[in-house]
Image (cartoon, rainbow, N blue to C red):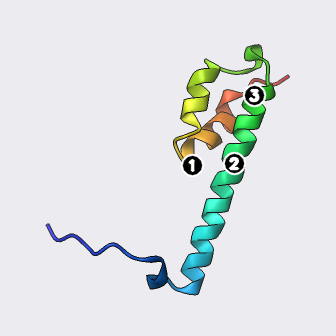
Amino acid sequence: MIMADKKQWSDFSGGQRALILFGSAIEVVLTTVALADLARRPRAQVRGPKSLWILGCIAQPIGPIAYLTLGRRST
């Protein structure tokens, strides 16, 4: 098995850097929104244990998206 060399930030083109920064910003926003909603939402309006959803939000980017789409009950 041949392992590729690890890329440095300077190895990426300007467009690639912009895409990485944009994706990172989206992940931060999604995680912040999900955790803020989870903190404010009463336990009865959350599907499953809140503690598991908090841990799930660490799994990027699936956790926050899963919570925002599946973890909340309608009010």
Residue at x 73% of width, y 29% of height: 38
Residue furthest out toward the left: 1
Residue found at the very far top of the displayed protein: 44
x, y percent for residue 3: 21, 70
Residue type, mark 3 in image: Ala
Three-letter residue code for mark 1? Pro
Estimate the x, y position of residue 4 in percent, counting from the top left.
Answer: 26, 73
Do tag 1 and tag 2 residues touch (Cβ < 8 Å)? yes
Q: Is residue 16 left or right of residue 30?
A: left
Query: Gap between marks 1 and 2, in whole Å?
Result: 8 Å
The front one of 11 and 19 is: 11
Task: Name the kind of residue labelled 2 in the image.
Answer: Leu
Reading the image, the residue beneath label 2 is 30
Residue labelled with disc 3: 39
How far apart are the two marked residues, 3 and 1, measured between alpha carbons? 19 Å
Q: Dividing the image into 4 quarters, which one contains the N terminus? A: bottom left
Mark number displayed over residue 6: none
Question: Looking at the image, which residue is at 73% across and 16% down?
Answer: 43
Q: CA distance from mark 2 to mark 3?
A: 14 Å
Please give left or right for residue 31 compared with residue 2 in the image: right
Q: Residues within 10 Å of mark 1 (few under 14, many from 20)?
A: some
For image coordinates 75% across by 43% down, the residue present is 33
Residue 17 against residue 64 in the figure, above or below: below
Q: Which residue is mark 1?
A: 61
Please report whichever mark, 1 or 2, sits nearer to the chain's N-terminal start: 2
Q: Are marks 2 and 3 in contact (CB under 8 Å)?
A: no
Q: Secondary structure at mark 3?
A: helix
